[in-house]
Image (cartoon, helix red, strand yellow):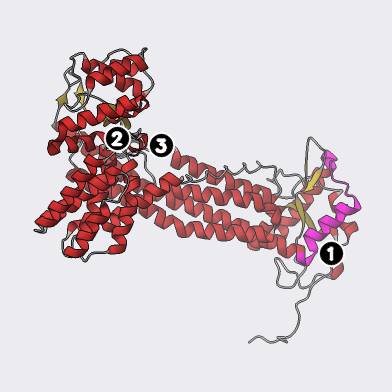
Amino acid sequence: MTGGNPNRRPVEHSAPTEATVKQLYGTAFRCGKPDCQRPLFRLDNETGDRTLNSRVAHIHARREGGPRWNRGMSDEANRSGENLLLLCIEHSYEIDDNAARFPPEMLREWKVAQLAEHDQIQQSWHLSNDEAAEAFALSFDPHQVSIATASATTVTAAARAVGKMVSVGRQRRRLAYQAAQAWQALRLRTNRAMPVFDLNGDRLTVEPSRAETKPYEEALTGALAESQAELEPLAVEVIAELHAVSAADQSLGQWCDWVERQVEELIAAAGRWPGRPPTEDDQAWPDAVAELQRASAALSAAWRGDRTVSPPEPAPAVPGPVETDLQRAVREHCELLELAGPWGRVEHRDYDAALYARLMAALPLANALPPVPSLTAMGLDLTARRAATVARNAGETAYSALIRQATKQTPLAAAVVLLQNLGAIARRQGHEALQDAATAEATKLLLAEDWKSSAVWADNRNHARRLLAWAADAGRGGEVRETLKTAIEANQDLLPSVIEAMGQWGEAFSRDGVDPPRMFQRISELPDWFPVVLVADLIKKTFPEVSAADEFASERYSDVVQQLASQILWIAEGNSNQ
């Protein structure tokens, strides 16, 4: 049974004097722990400045209940130099956190050895009054001691959390490595079983089928995702400790920021594997581990007061791609087409007038896109088809009004393509009268257009050849030829626009598929309604430096119009690019 007054305050001896602190530093040079070589102050070799790197530790604690408390010790004996030992910052906390490992007898032996070393080497530290006050405050001022204790605890916890994170990350990385190896083994088995050679007799790499590969890819992707999932809560733990360190000792903030940046780098590296199908692991993961460990070690060293590396400057933030007005318009256009997609997949959806109006407004943008395969999913034809399918169930009266409205759409290509699609949908719905009306309006627009206007050629640049072909198909080929001759003769400035309008769009893809496709125009043949003789004569007068050449030789001209003009001359001479 224990007794005593529960309200009794623990005994606490007086703090040593600053004079005692000066005397201690005057008889010691380095940390009192025999195997520690850290000096009690760090010297800057360039400036000569010195930084306190130590604390005054008690062999027997000042406060009742503290490490190695001696109830029978007097106040005078407790605060005397015989009960005090100079240690580096790290070991001053270590002896108190693990008091059982460091009994009073051991610490007194350290004290004797520290004094003996001073007598032998005659090196010590003569403190100024300010330095003595600093050492006193950091060792005995309750506020400073509590801050130092808090930072010691949090720095140690942060280092421990970093170590745990690295250990877990390495375990998870081995699982990802095994999944990658299994995938590679599948590829090796496939290649052994299916020897394939090229025309030169060199063996080709054969990839397993998608069905065979999918489980292995999923296993690797899953292992990487699980690695990140397991590391993320550990990262939260590390970052929480780092914030506590910064709060306890603001001078360590830059090292804390460094460790936090490297924690984020480690998480990112844990979720990636180089290559699909997988190649051997690269240096991204081990480099992330090594840099995190380096940052953590530097933080601990900075807290101890050791000389350490300064944190590297954070990499400048890489700004995300800035969306241009054109990119935004294209993105919104694609989103609009996706929104209208269901009307093309089913036939029962009600007419949405607001959505139809938005698609009508999007036709000019779609008209401006070159008609190449990579842009088919957002081009004029698809946009007009989406609009027509949205209007499918508008009712005959409303649908007829939409046909009339379409004739006012600009430019001409947008109006004609929309009318053609409205006619096609009407035919599918069994409304032949509406189909005929749409076709008639499209034909009327084609035949009524004033091709003498440069604006018409500019607005319909990507679709002019197709529009003129549709007009010719309506049995008006001769009329189309005469229209073009009259327009060109009346305004020879139209020649470049006419030449460019005859170019047929195409695109070339890089072999590795990395670079975006290269779009180009080429004239491989000319229609019967095109006044080739007249245009060839004008080309020779307007571009005397251009000579006839096929689609490949004409690339010597950097200007697109001159390239196409060269190809027109080639065809006019009886050649063909086909």
Provide the major secondary structure of the magenta segment. helix
- Towards the viewer: 177 or 62: 177
Label 2 close to label 3 by CB (< 8 Å): no
- What SS does tag 3 mark? loop
Q: Nearer the viewer, mark 2 or mark 3?
A: 2
Amino acid at dot 3: Asp
* Residue 173 badge: none
Q: Which residue appears at 11% of the width and 58% of the height? A: 431
Instruction: Say which residue label 2 marks.
Output: 451
Q: Which residue appears at 44% of the width and 55% of the height? A: 231
Q: Nearer the viewer, mark 3 or mark 1?
A: 3
x and y, in percent, of residue 44 in the image: 78, 39
x and y, in percent, of residue 492 in the image: 35, 24
Amino acid at dot 1: Arg
> Vertical placement of 76 versus 487: above or below?
below
x and y, in percent, of residue 326 in the image: 42, 44
Image side of residue 415 versus residue 52, left or right = left
> Vertical placement of 448 versus 567: above or below?
below
Instruction: Say which residue label 1 marks.
Output: 79
Q: Which residue appears at 34% of the width and 46% of the height? A: 364
| Quadrant position of residue 573 | top left
Instruction: Say which residue label 3 marks.
Output: 282
Image side of residue 29 versus residue 171, left or right = right
Q: Which residues are magenta?
A: 119-143
